[in-house]
Every structure is written in structure tokens, then in C-alpha cells.
Amino acid sequence: MTTPVRSASRHHKRPRGEGQWALGYREPLNKNEELKKNDDGLNVRQRIIDIYAKRGFDSIDPADLRGRFRWYGLYTQRRPGIDGGKTAVLEPEELDDRYFMLRIRIDGGRLTVDQLRTIADVSRRYARGTADITDRQNIQLHWVEIESVPAIWEALERVGLDTTEACGDTPRVIIGCPLAGIDADEVIDASPQIADIRSRYIGDKAFSNLPRKFKSAVSGCPAHCTVHEINDVAFVGVVNEDGERGYDLWVGGGLSTNPMLAKRLGVFVAPERVHEVWAGVAGIFRDYGYRRLRHRARLKFLVNDWGVERFREVLEREYLGYALPEGPAPAPPRGGRRDHVGVHRQKDGNFYVGFAPKVGRLDADRLDRIADIAERYGSRRVHTTTEQKMVILDIAPDKVDDIVADLEAADLPVHPSTFRRQTMACTGIEYCKLAIVETKATASRLIDELERRLPGFAEPLTINVNGCPNSCARIQTADIGLKGQLVVDEDGRQVEGFQIHLGGSLGVNSGFGRKVRGLKTTAKALPDYVERVVRNYEKQRAEGETFAE
Ligand code: SF4
């Protein structure tokens, strides 16, 4: 049911000169805007197939290489051997390797066993066997050569996967609960809405030139696993006062520098309207988003300046043509952890089994092994989570013990330590051109050390390791957030280290971790530092008190 549109909008005020298209600022305002205006990022696909893959790396137009390639999930890797101190001083071309990272988008984290095997095969043939699960449910390959890209796309597309708009100023992967449709406690199964948005708008030129990236989440997960608070747009499952199931709409969340939590618009979105409301929010971002300064080009800045009332008014009046009904806030997240690790019952009486690859790092052989294990126990579905973990679905009750044993034997623990379960790491200096420090190996060593030193620790505790201030692994929302930077060690040498943020959390008491003034550690001393923090927490915590409290 719709209600009449409310009072006239106040947004036709004097233009503010932030590069908003809707206010007439259509001229290119910086290099990124110029690049997008000159040619849509989606057009690069045909050039890759027809020209670059045939003629090789040196034939690639620099504007495509460092710009439009992202529209298909391709970034040049960091040239090996360049230390973090050079990140800010070298020109982009000096940092570029001749190999690419390729991000495969996995909307809603939904993968079949066949798709998993295809990714393993592609990785083995074209990516030196690499495969990292990201905290937005994607899988990233490394060491890809431009000559291989058309064959990779063909292989992926044969099984319904692709890399379209996996990066770039576009609607990135739509995250969703990996248990959509099977969790006995879910508020609503969001998978039809994710599929709907995906099929209508991904790869559509109406949304392929946004001011910057646009992150979406649609979920009815009772544990709120899709971190709706830090997405540009999020639909969170609710039941309204008439008992109808639908979504509460959140906009303007984001981390990186100037982190902001998303704000509720207070409306109820019926499932069949989700796609048009998504297009309305994305449209506002496209038309009113700030394009002049790259660091202010995320939706959160517009939401912050407008406030929720004005945002809602513009959405309803200019983009939907009808008013949305008021709606309730989501119920607090189900107790316990937000991830889906462990063994849990599905609504159909089968079980799902979540397990923890270490900091999301896998490889082709292990992807195949996971597919083998899933199939051996009758499952055709292996989904990715937003915490760099995986879940095998549809396991019959009498097979649970055996699959758990097989996964544990493959170093894919279903009952991992807190440290293994709740530590995430971004890509870091191994491949990322923005990185200042190494992350994956550092975080792996940290997990090993903490498991050895604190074997009985079982409380929830998130540790997020980032290689630079960009927060791809969500530093500000972790109990212990580690931001990579160079620090001075006790001998006065500049070495890799981390700035510490403490006490971040999402959920009932959402809040960003506090940067502890002056508190830094070298990468080498990191295990000592975290051990001290954990021991202090154990000593001081009251019964039931979380780390953030
Ligand atoms: Fe790269 Fe920084 Fe993101 Fe890590 S946080 S992946 S280092 S940009």
C-alpha cells in the first residue's frame, strides 16, 4: 500500500558546487570523472577481448589499465619488492606489475559446487592457484595475465559467474546472508530480491557511472551477518505491525577515512518494491552524489549533509513517485556471534556446517577439496560469508559428524579457536598497490601465536588487520582494529607496524573503535601486544561483558 507524497522538497537550494549532476555540474571535475565521461567503464570489455588480450600488456591504454579495467574486477597488482615506504611517493605506473588481481563477484555469497570447481580450475590454469575469500563474499584471484582474461570470463560465464562491476565506481557485489532461505530463524529470504537487483541493474549503463563505489546489502538474517550498518544501502528484514514481512531501509554507511554508520529512513519496503527502491537510492547517489573531490564522493557524505528526512523526501518524490509507509526497526541481532561458523540446524531438518579458512586464504586444490567434501556428503551448495569464511549447506543429520571430521582434517576447522574464527585480514602489501604493510601472513602468524599462548580463550573477540588506512578489512568495527603503517622500532629503524583501534562493534551497541592515541606496535611485537590486551580483558571483564563494553 502506498500513501500520498509528502510536502515539497527543500533540496532545490543553491547549488553547493560539489559536482552534483542534478545541480548542473556535469563538466569533468577531476581525472576520474573525466575518464568516466570520455568512455563508460563497461565498454572496456570488448577492447580486452578484441585488442588487449591479443596484443598483450603493453598495448593497454593507461586510462583503461588504471581506470576502466576495474569495471570488470581487474586491478594491476603491486610490483613485488616495493616496500611500504614507497607507496605514497611512487607514480602509479612505478607500482604496477604486469599481472592482475581478478575479483569474481558472488552476490549473496551463493556458490554451487560446480561453480566452486570452475573457480578452482580457472585459478589453477590462469592464476597460479591463488584464491582469497574477501569480507564481501567475493573470491579474488592473483597473477592473472591479460591474455587469459577472455578465457577466464568464458569459463566463469558458462557456470553463471562473472566479474562485471566487481570494482570501479559501480554497484559492487550485493551481499546477503549465506543462509538465506534455509535459516530456521530468518525474518525473510532475501535471495529473490538480490537476484532481482542483480539481473536488472548490474551491467546497466544507467548505474555504471556513479561518483564512487556503491555497496549494497539485502538480508533477513537474524544474526545481522551482512553488516548493514556499513553499507551505502541496506535492506534489513523486518515484520511490520500488520504481520507483513519486508525490509527496513538504511543508507549512507561506510568506513575508510571518515567512517559513518548507516542511517535508518524509517520506511517499510515490501519485497516486490526492493528493486525500485534500490534503483532510487542508487539514482540519488548518481545524480546528487559529490563528484568534485574523490574523498567526499561516497553516499555517506550526502546523507550526512542532507539528513534522513530530506533524503527520504527526495527518494519518494523524485525517484519513486510515491511515499513509502512507515516501518519498524529491525529486531536486535540474535545472540552470539554474527558469523555462521559451526554446525546448525536448517529449517528443513538438515544442517549447515560453517568452517574457517585462515584469514580467507585458500588455493585451487583446497577449493576442489571443499567441493569434494561437500559432494561426498550430498551437498551441492557452498556459500561464502562476510567474514572470509564458508558454509556447506544441506547436510543430513547422520552425516554431520563425518563431514566435520573431514573438514577438520583438511585444516578447515568447524570448531576453530576464537582467534582463527574472528580474525580477518585484507590483501595487504603482497598484491595491493595502496598497502603500507603485509597483512595475510602477519595475521596468520598472530593467530598461531595466540592459539599457542592463550589456548583456553573462548570469548568473542574480533581482530581485523588492514594494510593501510582504507579499512577493506573493517578496522573500525573490530574489537582490536589494526591499521597498517610504518613505525619506529626500539632501534630507531622504520619498520612495518600498526596503529591500534580498540572497542569497535556492530549490532545493538554499534560504534567505531577508538584510536588509542600514540598506541602503535611493530608487526614483530604484535602477538605480545594482543596477548597483553586479551589477558587484561580476561582479568577485568564482568560476567557477560563484551570487549567493546
Ligand atoms: Fe589494500 Fe589498504 Fe584495502 Fe588493505 S586496506 S586491501 S592495503 S587498500
Image (spheres, rainbow, N blue to C red):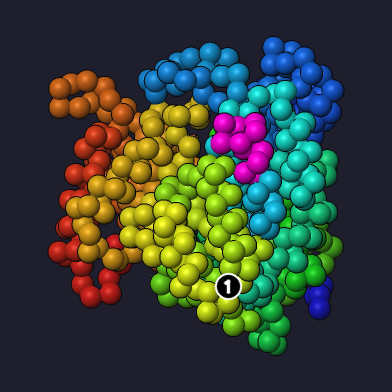
Q: Total marks drawn?
A: 1
Q: Going 55% across and 37% down the picture, which residue do you hit? A: 130
Q: Is residue 126 magenta?
A: yes
Secondary structure category for the residue under label 1:
strand
Q: Position of residue 260 (x, y in %)?
A: 50, 51
Taking 287 as reference, is 96 above or below it?
above
> Is 211 left or right of 273, judged from the image as shown?
left
* Residue at numbered disc 1: 395
Magenta residues (range): 119-129
Name the image quarter holding the C terminus.
bottom left
Q: Residue furthest bottom?
A: 242
Q: Does the image show residue 279?
A: no
Q: Amino acid at mark 1?
A: Ile
Q: Position of residue 243 (x, y in %)?
A: 68, 87
Q: Going 42% across and 75% down the picture, which residue do you hit? A: 335
Classify mark 1 as within 8 Å of ligand 1 or not, answering yes or no: no
414 or 532, which is in the foreground?
A: 414
Q: Is residue 369 magenta?
A: no
Taking 510 as reference, is 238 above or below it?
below
Image-quadrant location for residue 218? bottom right
Residues packed near mark 1 inside 10 Å, few (<14), some (14 to 19) or many (20 plus): many
